[in-house]
């Protein structure tokens, strides 16, 4: 039997004893903390311990907020068997406004979406004065006008004894955004551990990352070719006018810069700049459409054009003119007659077929950005042997695509967990926080430039056993740059967190004193959590040798001539010596 954590407010024999989680809980109880751990490292378990101790040491109640209804239900399911003598409840938009008034006071642990919390505080039906702990899951959302940031500020202004515990695996690559999260939630310390941390590494399941490059079918390149020539002609004209100035291949950054220069030219009174703005806007639309065709395929391109024709800007003169152009209207007709033919669809089928052939009990998640791509993949996978795909998208209905209600989302995740569905085909709504223990293969239909989304997607596998992540990259498309950008931004994220961590005031030092109510129980004995952590620290302490036994060879060096240290062609005094 493994050692388990015991606490007066926790059910016994549920939480495995891990020293790094106890250290994180100790720091979180010392002052408002943001916990940054890799996915599957157990951020939720740390939250359980913090909640238990706060319930034990104060008379207040705990509020847990998570960005989606599916995550709220997941947290609730996790807390119910863990907490001793407490019946947690959830409050979401599914609960009518009139009934929520009574719900808020009916439990000492409430899990809710931030929008509901904010709205009920504003209408006066919720008071956070006695809330002694706010747990913020996926805390990187707590910026700008997001309800999560607003709830953080409301809590800090109302609570008589506030403590914030924020968790995320991906706080962001920009220092200013990490700093804003800490500011909005009044974070005074950041607890950060990397995947190679000695205490952590032995508890993480293996994760194999593989890139698969595919060629774009000639039929799709033929569809894109008129658009490429059209865009190139626009950019060439703007280069001659001095508006598009960035070298290399046409890029979104280059077009954005050209648009800024055209807008500046308008402010200077240059009459031809208005036409430049219109043409650059067309080039931007073409850029998105070309990338959709080459990197995504027919389904995503149809969805893009449908959104363009039915969206808020569909009535503008430029949009109408773009859609009436023979090259676009011809493309729309061609796409309507075509089934999905991108090589990535075949690659997804092969990967799923091979995984299920090796192990019919496997679970696979396929991530794609666009709903039409999700629908096309679901159809493509459905006829594979042993494959039982299910579609997982957001709640909103748009562009003729029906969304899923919160109840339907939960039901589909349950189907995936219990095995009645074994392939989850999801948009970005499935990326964050979902704990799907048996998912052992994640397929990225395309790489995403966001380091947050990349980390979240990757974290859906390898949570409890070895997992595999496959990224599909279409050759000679934006996919190649997007994948490189995501890798760079992951490194920037680590640097940003370290820098902000050094900046913020740390408050009092965490010294394990908050762990006095925790014990570690095993078949052999029971010891205090403090002694357990100290023993684990000693076990993983890096030994420094008192002597260095490495033999250093002295190299034979000769005196270097003076001109070695001068710039090429420079005269030295030794050249004027009279022999």
Image (cartoon, rainbow, N blue to C red):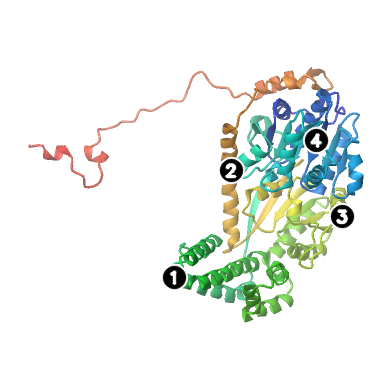
The first of marks 3 and 4 along the sequence is 4
Q: Earlier in the sequence, mark 2 or mark 3?
A: 2
Q: CA gap, disc 4 to disc 2?
A: 28 Å
Q: Position of residue 313 (x, y in %)?
A: 68, 69
* Residues marked 4 and 1 touching at CB (< 8 Å): no
Comparing labels 3 and 4, the label whose residue is closer to the camera: 4
Q: Specify the label residue 408 is tagged with.
A: 3
In the drawing, does residue 369 fall left or right of residue 493? right
Judge whether 406 appears above or below 269 on screen: above
Q: Looking at this view, name the residue that lies furthest to the left.
A: 579
Residue that numbered label 1 is attached to: 241
Q: Residues within 10 Å of mark 1 (few under 14, many from 20)?
A: some
* Location of mark 4 (residue): 128
The image position of residue 414, as x and y in percent, is 87, 49
Assign the C terminus to one quadrant of the image.
top left
- Pointer 2 residue: 176
Dot placed on the residue nearer the N-terminal end, 4 or 1: 4
Separation of residues labelled 2 and 3 (CA atoms): 37 Å
Q: Nearer the viewer, mark 2 or mark 3?
A: 2
């Amino acid at each position: 039997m493994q050692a388990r954590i015991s606490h007066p407010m926790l059910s016994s024999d549920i939480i495995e004893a891990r020293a790094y989680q106890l250290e994180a809980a100790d720091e979180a109880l010392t002052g408002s903390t943001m916990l940054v751990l890799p996915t599957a490292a157990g951020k939720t378990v740390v939250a359980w311990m913090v909640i238990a101790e706060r319930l034990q040491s104060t008379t207040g109640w705990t509020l847990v907020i998570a960005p989606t209804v599916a995550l709220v239900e997941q947290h609730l399911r996790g807390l119910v068997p863990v907490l001793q003598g407490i019946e947690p409840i959830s409050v979401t938009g599914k609960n009518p406004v009139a009934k929520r008034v009574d719900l808020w006071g009916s439990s000492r642990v409430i899990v809710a979406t931030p929008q509901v919390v904010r709205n009920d505080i504003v209408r006066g039906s919720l008071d956070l004065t006695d809330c002694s702990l706010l747990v913020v899951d996926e805390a990187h959302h707590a910026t700008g006008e997001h309800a999560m940031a607003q709830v953080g500020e409301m809590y800090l202004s109302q609570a008589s004894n506030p403590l914030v515990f924020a968790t995320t695996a991906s706080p962001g690559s920009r220092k200013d955004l990490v700093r804003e999260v800490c500011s909005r939630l009044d974070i005074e310390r950041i607890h950060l551990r990397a995947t190679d941390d000695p205490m952590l590494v032995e508890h993480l399941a293996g994760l194999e990352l593989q890139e698969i490059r595919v060629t774009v079918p000639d039929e799709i390149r033929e569809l894109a070719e008129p658009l490429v020539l059209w865009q190139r002609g626009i950019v060439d004209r703007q280069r001659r006018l001095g508006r598009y100035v960035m070298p290399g291949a046409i890029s979104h950054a280059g077009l954005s810069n050209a648009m800024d220069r055209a807008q500046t030219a308008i402010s200077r009174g240059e009459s031809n700049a208005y036409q430049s703005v219109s043409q650059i806007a067309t080039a931007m639309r073409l850029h998105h459409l070309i990338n959709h065709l080459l990197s995504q395929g027919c389904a995503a391109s149809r969805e893009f054009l449908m959104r363009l024709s039915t969206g808020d800007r569909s009535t503008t003169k430029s949009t109408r003119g773009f859609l009436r152009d023979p090259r676009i209207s011809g493309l729309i007709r061609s796409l309507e007659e075509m089934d999905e033919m991108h090589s990535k669809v075949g690659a997804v089928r092969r990967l799923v077929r091979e995984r299920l052939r090796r192990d019919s009990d496997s679970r696979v998640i396929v991530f794609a950005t666009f709903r039409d791509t999700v629908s096309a993949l679901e159809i493509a996978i459905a006829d594979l042997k042993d494959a039982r795909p299910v579609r997982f998208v957001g709640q909103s209905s748009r562009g003729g695509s029906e969304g899923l209600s919160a109840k339907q989302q939960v039901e589909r995740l349950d189907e995936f967990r219990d095995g009645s569905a074994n392939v989850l085909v999801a948009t970005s709504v499935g990326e964050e926080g979902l704990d799907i223990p048996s998912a052992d293969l994640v397929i990225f239909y395309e790489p995403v430039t966001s380091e947050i989304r990349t980390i979240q997607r990757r974290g859906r596998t390898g949570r409890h056993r070895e997992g595999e992540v496959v990224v599909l990259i279409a050759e000679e498309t934006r996919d190649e740059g997007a994948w490189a950008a995501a890798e760079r931004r992951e490194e920037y994220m680590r640097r940003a967190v370290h820098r902000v961590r050094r900046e913020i005031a740390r408050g009092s030092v965490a010294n394990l004193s908050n762990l006095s109510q925790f014990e570690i129980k095993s078949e052999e004995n029971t010891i205090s959590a403090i002694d357990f952590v100290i023993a684990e620290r000693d076990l993983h302490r890096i030994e420094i040798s008192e002597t260095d036994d490495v033999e250093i060879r002295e190299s034979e060096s000769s005196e270097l001539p003076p001109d070695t240290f001068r710039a090429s062609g420079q005269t030295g005094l030794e050249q004027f010596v009279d022999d």
